[in-house]
Image: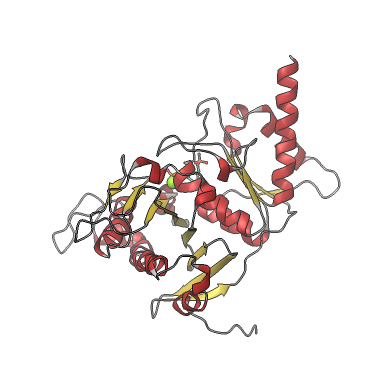
Amino acid sequence: MKNIARKTLDEFIIERQEDFKYSTGELSRLLNSILLAARVVSYKVNKAGLVDILGAVGTTNVQGEDQKKLDVYANDVFIQTLVNREIVCGIASEENDNFITIQGLDEGHNNKYVVLMDPLDGSSNIEVNVSVGTIFSIYRRISPIGSPVTMEDFLQPGVNQVAAGYILYGTSTMIVYTTGRGVNGFTLNPAIGSFYLSHPDMRCSKNAKTYSINEGNYVHFPQGVKDYIKYCQEEKDERPYTARYIGSLVSDCHRNLITGGIYLYPSTHKAPKGKLRLLYECNPMAFITEQAGGSATDGRNRILELQPTELHQRTPFYCGSANMVEKLKDFIAQADEKETKK
Ligand code: AHM
Ligand code: MG
């Protein structure tokens, strides 16, 4: 049996306090608030299968409260927790059209961080009991402390992230996060509500043999991506590769972090900018993946260097094992070159 010292996330955060540059403990407290919300959402997600028995969405539960869809519920829980603890000055969520300004008790907007999140990604998977996740991304505000947050606090390139992470509600609930000094994963012991360090210093292998894409959209993919898929399927050298697609970004990226692989969500004819959101999904996943030694691109540019222009901006997204991402970029560049020569 592996002898892993039992270290809780709280102990880890205290031990690694020096990771939190400029810290007055604010970022640690912020992470703790996210953990609190994660525990509440985890409990609710685990009970999702009982909804038919205890009351369907849209009906009233025994306490007389309306049953909410889980993604709306998760959004409310994360926002309420962060608002109640007055730990951030602003929140942007995939579920809300606009960002939320948080006014401190003294109306001073004194906190320095903003949080961007996708409270329950892949929520269409819930009804079939497949894993879903929460994704979050934390930035220092640009506007002066003491004033209300502005759009520019949220529209920062991913390289400015101070921390990012995801919570995976899977066979176990896990949190995986980075503050820019590697990636660590913690698993929830639901009996006592503590997260334990289970995946120290996660590394994404440079080479791997798994590709992860919704191939049902194949005919709509750009030529470079089609060529790469054919390359993955070719019987040569270490190939063909294996395809694995859960259709839940957190789960697919988590698998790739652990066993290696590439995740692809390209532009399609129907969705020329792709499906995934730069600020809530791609930037945090790119930061985590790079910190684990992998890479992330929109096909031509590093995801973390893209300058966002709107909150709900979408982008094509390719992320995972560095050499696989590099190979994909070669195919895209070759297809671009052929296109310009036409
Ligand atoms: P969502 O934010 O509406 O849940 O959509 C994001 C999800 C990702 O988790 C997943 O990787 C992708 O959409 C799957 O999309 P598709 O069903 O088109 O393959
Ligand atoms: Mg999402």
Colour setting: secondary structure
Residue at 48% across / 61% down in the picture?
168
Q: Can you tell which quarter of the image residue 220 is in?
A: top right
Q: Looking at this view, name the residue that lies furthest to the right.
A: 237
Q: Can you tell which quarter of the image residue 106 is in?
A: bottom left
Q: Is residue 13 left or right of residue 199?
A: left
Indicate whether 57 appears above or below 214. Answer: below
Quadrant of the drawing holding the N terminus: bottom right
* Coordinates of residue 50 in the picture (x, y in percent): 32, 62
* Coordinates of residue 232 in the picture (x, y in percent): 74, 42
For the image shown, how many numbered marks are present on the structure? 0
Q: Can residue 268 be seen by looking at this rendering?
A: yes
Residue at 69% across / 45% down in the picture?
325
* Coordinates of residue 53 in the picture (x, y in percent): 27, 61
Residue in the foreground of this view, choosing between 44 and 154: 154
Residue in the foreground of this view, choosing between 3 and 80: 80
Q: Looking at this view, name the residue that lies furthest to the left.
A: 64
Residue at 37% across / 53% down in the picture?
114
Residue in the foreground of this view, choosing between 337 and 112: 112
Q: Is residue 148 left or right of residue 126?
A: left
Quadrant of the drawing holding the C terminus: top right
Q: Is residue 339 left or right of residue 175?
A: right
* Coordinates of residue 9 in the picture (x, y in percent): 47, 75
Residue at 27% across / 62% down in the picture?
86
Q: Can you tell which quarter of the image residue 191 is in?
A: bottom left
Indicate whether 187 appears above or below 337. Answer: below
Q: Can residue 248 be seen by looking at this rendering?
A: no
Indicate whether 301 appears above or below 250. Answer: above
